[in-house]
């Protein structure tokens, strides 16, 4: 029995609580807009202030807990998430629409991240380095930084919060977490399970509310030492400017305009499956979604023909139905944005080959469904070839050779994920070197990140940090350099070096 219209709360200083102002906002199911998933505190600056104060207090004890002890709690968290995987995934489908197969994958990524952290707690390595002086020892250690402000988008409601919450805590930083307003229920389940795993009060604080009322005060709060943000490039720039004014450490994972290249020697069936999954999975609402298909002219005609047939056959509907292959857009505004881009593409002279409209059959009337859409005849300068649409729209661009494919690929402000299908090892290595992107897949679609590998992009997709893998621990910790001189005398670096006989 689905618990509809549930009342959810903030979690501040070890207590579940309402916003100070007492106001609430609703979270609805994008597949059935009349279904309210829950109501949440509409928090403001004063709630952020309370949460930051609690986190600052908790820092003094949390930073002293041995890292393997912190890590042990993530083993427990992973076990709890495994137990609750199905329930969490269903809740996620209800609050943001992607199909159960994908929400189970999203939850699994959270589980994998927790278990990975459980091991990393025994490997938070520093370096030992030879000193240039005798009887002196040099090393680096990883230190906690302070209070972490975490702000997440709605398209990966469990995976992305886990990518931030887990390494922040493992590295010894208490946190204040502001989830996306579209997916506060999944975020709350994560915090509930973290508490069940045994984390102490004050270390984790959850504040629901909007980007302007909660996100901005969190970024600007002088008690917050670092910000980890995933979302749009526009908001990322705003955050970078505000946090930069206080010289905060900031990690930004932003938008994408990812492309799959298919060369004439590729395995065509594999390339076809890849682009269908990459373009229409999560209704195209992934930062790594394939929104451009760069096809070699020799295979263009046949490939497009097959692609359109397959796209037209995609089953659209409520993601809770296991036979459905594509869910709705997140809300009415996003669906309208997608439709505006389709109109822009037509005006620019691209050829609309399938989809291009709302999907409102039978039980889909009450949701924000859009048909899988494909444009051919797209040129690299068109807006639909350059701008992030964040919907089920694929722009196909025809090229004459690999050099042109790479040039077209790089003709965007973004640089997150890229893919090439080819059996030619020389072409593959050239692509690995020349595609401007943080991630390149050979014979795989643009989506499919694994939690123990670095994740992030170049150009306007980010600011050089990486989530996932060992690299995220570099962001969430500060390196301290330590020199231990056990010579019993003053030794002057750069001045007393080269006197080996004296040791
Ligand atoms: P968004 O509008 O940028 O929002 C992201 C988060 O920031 C939300 O929690 C939002 O709150 C909050 N926010 C909004 N304005 C803010 C401000 N001025 N200051 C501080 N916080 C603010 O992005 P979205 O629509 O949720 O997600 C889609 C975007 O995320 C796409 O561009 C996608 O490519 C990108 N994305 C990137 C990655 C990556 O790893 N590179 C992964 C996933 C998604 P509200 O929810 O209350 O508005
Ligand atoms: Mg919702």
Image: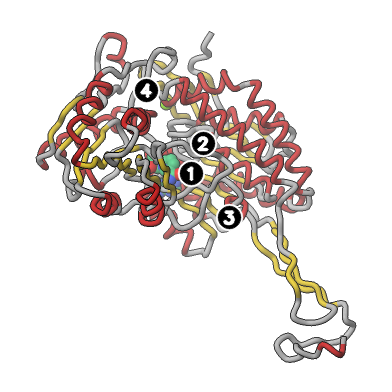
Q: Are marks 1 and 2 in contact (CB under 8 Å)?
A: yes
In front of the other: 380 or 309: 309
- Disc 1 marks which residue? 214
* Label 3 vs 1, first from the N-terminus: 1
Measure the C-alpha gap from mark 2 to mark 4.
19 Å
| Of labels 3 and 4, the one closer to you | 3
Can residue 212 be seen here? The reply is: no
Residue that extends furthest to the right in the rendered view of this protein: 488
- Disc 2 marks which residue? 208
- Disc 3 marks which residue? 475
Measure the C-alpha gap from mark 3 to mark 1.
23 Å
Measure the C-alpha gap from mark 3 to mark 2.
25 Å
Could you tell me which quadrant the C terminus lies in? bottom right
- Disc 4 marks which residue? 30
The reply to whether the residue tagged 1 has its Cβ within 8 angstroms of ligand 1 is yes
Ligand 2 position by quadrant: top left
Q: Is residue 87 left or right of residue 406?
A: right
């Amino acid at each position: 029995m689905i618990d509809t219209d549930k009342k959810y709360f903030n979690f501040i200083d070890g207590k579940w609580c309402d916003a100070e102002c007492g106001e609430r906002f609703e979270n609805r199911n994008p597949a059935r807009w009349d279904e309210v998933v829950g109501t949440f505190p509409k928090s403001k600056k004063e709630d952020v202030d309370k949460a930051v104060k609690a986190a600052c207090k908790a820092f003094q004890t949390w930073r002293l807990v041995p890292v393997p002890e912190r890590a042990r709690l993530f083993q427990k968290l992973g076990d709890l998430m495994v137990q609750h995987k199905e329930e969490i995934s269903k809740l996620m489908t209800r609050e943001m629409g992607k199909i159960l197969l994908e929400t189970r994958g999203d939850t699994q990524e959270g589980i994998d991240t927790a278990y990975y952290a459980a091991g990393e707690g025994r490997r938070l390595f520093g370096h030992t380095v030879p000193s240039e002086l005798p009887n002196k020892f040099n090393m680096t250690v990883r230190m906690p930084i302070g209070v972490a402000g975490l702000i997440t988008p709605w398209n990966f409601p469990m995976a992305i919060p886990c990518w931030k919450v887990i390494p922040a805590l493992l590295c010894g930083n208490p946190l204040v977490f502001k989830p996306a307003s579209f997916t506060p229920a999944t975020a709350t389940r994560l915090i509930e399970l973290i508490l069940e795993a045994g984390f102490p009060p004050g270390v984790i604080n959850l504040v629901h509310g909007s980007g302007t009322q909660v996100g901005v005060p969190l970024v600007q709060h002088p008690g917050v030492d670092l910000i980890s943000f995933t979302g749009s490039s526009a908001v990322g720039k705003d955050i970078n400017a505000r946090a930069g004014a206080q010289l905060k450490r900031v990690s930004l994972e932003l938008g994408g305009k990812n492309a799959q290249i298919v060369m004439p020697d590729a395995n065509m069936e594999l390339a076809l499956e890849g682009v269908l999954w990459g373009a229409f999975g999560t209704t195209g609402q992934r930062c790594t979604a394939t929104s451009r298909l760069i096809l070699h002219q020799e295979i263009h005609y046949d490939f497009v023909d097959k692609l359109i047939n397959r796209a037209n056959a995609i089953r659209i509907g409520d993601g809770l139905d296991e036979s459905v292959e594509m869910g709705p857009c997140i809300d009415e505004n996003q669906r309208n944005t997608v439709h505006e881009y389709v109109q822009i593409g037509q005006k620019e002279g691209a050829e609309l080959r399938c989809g291009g409209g709302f999907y409102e059959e039978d039980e889909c009337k009450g949701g924000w469904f859009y048909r899988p859409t494909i444009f051919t005849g797209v040129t690299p300068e068109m807006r639909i070839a350059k701008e992030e649409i964040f919907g089920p729209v694929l722009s196909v661009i025809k090229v004459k050779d690999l050099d042109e494919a790479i040039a077209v690929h790089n003709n965007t402000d973004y640089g997150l994920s890229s893919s090439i299908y080819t059996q030619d090892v020389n072409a593959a290595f050239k692509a690995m070197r020349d595609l401007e992107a943080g991630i390149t897949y050979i014979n795989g679609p643009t989506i499919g990140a694994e939690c123990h590998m670095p994740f992030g992009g170049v150009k306007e997709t980010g600011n050089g940090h990486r989530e996932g893998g060992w690299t995220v621990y570099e962001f969430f910790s500060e390196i301290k350099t330590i020199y231990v001189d056990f010579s019993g005398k003053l030794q002057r670096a750069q001045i007393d070096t080269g006197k080996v006989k004296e040791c």
